[in-house]
């Protein structure tokens, strides 16, 4: 049997086998039941396909595939792909020509749950999927959510997905259920979709005990290892050096409740920018007292005491933000992103 004598279903089956299980499995989700049945039957009639004939088939379908050898036992390989892509019940329904009924105890629709995910997370997931899969998923979401997710993708990928959304018809129920199952197993049921606010707060409380150099080093390490929900941690982290990033109103609230002795101790040896941002947030009389103390130098004052004073101010700032007095700079940056 040569490439010229193969039927179109046999050629399609040959290409799917050549693509390998991961790629073929994703494509199988978009075939109708009758098409899948035809592919299975065609694959079972295939035998060895020389590489030269396979190249003719690929060229005919105008697609690009990775380099591979001649194909053996095509029927067995197609069965393996199907068994890893579909459940036994789904394969049986396809071969018997029956449409699966939705079970009474089927899980609720996943689309409202998907809409609760961060657009960046959902976009990162869809960026690794076939554009047709991404188009179908986004078509199920509300326009606002879909738009936010699309904006997280690279332009070429975004355009390809939107093009498919324009021309896409309704997906068969079986294909929809398969994709819903994959989304639930790979995205919604993962630990990363759970509420991690408590964990973020715990990590942030640890980081807030570090000085600036230690904090920067640890945050860089967390980024390099791909720590999930790191933005939530950053939104809760605050160091003494971040004081200039607070609004004037927030700084006034912070230093209004602190003693001049604590402020003076914390300001010893600080850069001019930080000193001015703090002094501009307190009363004129208190400012004159602090400036007078600072002008006398810091000789004999332990560095540990200075660092402890700065940590006290940072802790007071974090406490006020938790009480809703204002937002930390990290939270504002996260919202802007």
Image (cartoon, rainbow, N blue to C red):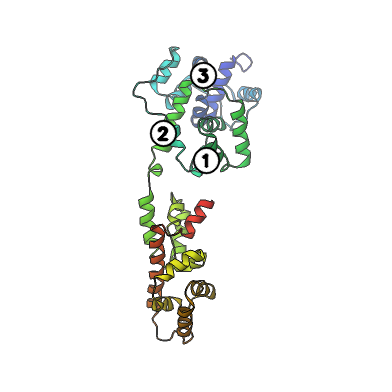
Query: Considering depth in this image, is 84 or 53 the residue closer to the camera?
Result: 84
- Per the model, the C-alpha gap separating discs 2 and 3 is 22 Å
| Label 1 – label 2 distance at C-alpha | 15 Å
Q: Position of residue 150 (x, y in %)?
A: 57, 39
x, y percent for residue 235: 45, 56
In the picture, residue 88 is in which quadrant? top left
Q: Residue furthest top?
A: 97
Residue 86, position as x, y percentages in the image: 43, 24
**137 up-or-down from 93: above or below:** below
Residue 25 image offset from top left, x and y in percent: 49, 28
Quarter of the picture containing the N terminus is top right
Of the two numbered discs 1 and 2 on the same chain, state the one appearing first in sequence: 1
Residue found farthest to the left: 105
Judge by depth and name the residue closer to the eye, 203 or 264.
264
Above or below residue 300? Residue 242 is above
Q: From what the image shows, is residue 21 above or below residue 98?
A: below
Res. 298 image quadrant: bottom left
Q: Which mark is drawn over residue 123?
A: 1
Mark sitting earlier along the chain (2/3):
3
Q: Are marks 1 and 2 in contact (CB under 8 Å)?
A: no
Name the one closer to the observer, 174 or 77.
174
| Image disc number at residue 184 | 2
The answer to whether mark 1 and mark 3 are in CB contact below 8 A is no
Q: Which residue is mark 3?
A: 32
Callout 2 crowding tier (Cα within 10 Å): few <14, some 14–19, many ≥20: some
Mark in front: 2 vs 3 = 2
Residue at figure coordinates x 51%, y 66% from the top left: 248
| Mark 1 / mark 3, whichever is N-terminal | 3
């Amino acid at each position: 049997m040569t490439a010229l004598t193969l039927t179109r279903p046999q050629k399609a089956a040959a290409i799917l086998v050549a693509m390998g299980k991961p790629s073929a499995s994703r494509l199988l989700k978009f075939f109708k039941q009758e098409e899948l049945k035809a592919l299975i039957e065609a694959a079972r009639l295939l035998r060895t396909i020389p590489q030269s004939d396979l190249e003719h088939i690929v060229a005919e379908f105008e697609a690009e595939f990775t380099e591979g050898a001649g194909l053996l036992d095509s029927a067995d390989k197609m069965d393996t792909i199907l068994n890893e892509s579909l459940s036994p019940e789904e394969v049986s329904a396809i071969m018997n020509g029956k449409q699966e009924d939705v079970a009474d105890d089927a899980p609720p629709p996943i689309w409202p749950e998907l809409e609760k995910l961060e657009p960046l997370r959902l976009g990162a997931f869809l960026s690794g999927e076939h554009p047709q899969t991404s188009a179908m998923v986004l078509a199920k979401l509300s326009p606002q959510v879909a738009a936010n997710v699309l904006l997280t993708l690279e332009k070429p990928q975004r355009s390809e997905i939107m093009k498919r959304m324009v021309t896409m018809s309704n997906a068969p129920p079986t294909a929809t259920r398969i994709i819903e199952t994959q989304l639930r197993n790979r995205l919604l049921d993962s630990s990363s979709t759970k509420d991690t606010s408590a964990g973020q707060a715990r990590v942030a409380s640890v980081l807030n005990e570090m000085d600036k150099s230690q904090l920067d080093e640890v945050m860089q390490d967390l980024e390099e290892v791909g720590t999930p929900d790191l933005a939530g941690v950053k939104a809760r982290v605050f160091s003494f050096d971040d004081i200039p990033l607070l609004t004037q109103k927030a700084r006034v609230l912070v230093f209004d409740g602190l003693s001049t002795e604590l402020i003076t101790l914390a300001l010893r040896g600080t850069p001019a920018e930080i000193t001015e941002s703090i002094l501009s947030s307190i009363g004129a009389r208190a400012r004159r007292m602090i400036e007078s103390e600072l002008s006398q130098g810091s000789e004999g004052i332990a560095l540990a005491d200075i660092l402890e004073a700065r940590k006290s101010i940072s802790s007071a700032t974090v406490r006020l933000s938790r009480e809703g007095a204002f937002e930390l700079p990290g939270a504002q940056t996260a919202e802007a992103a």
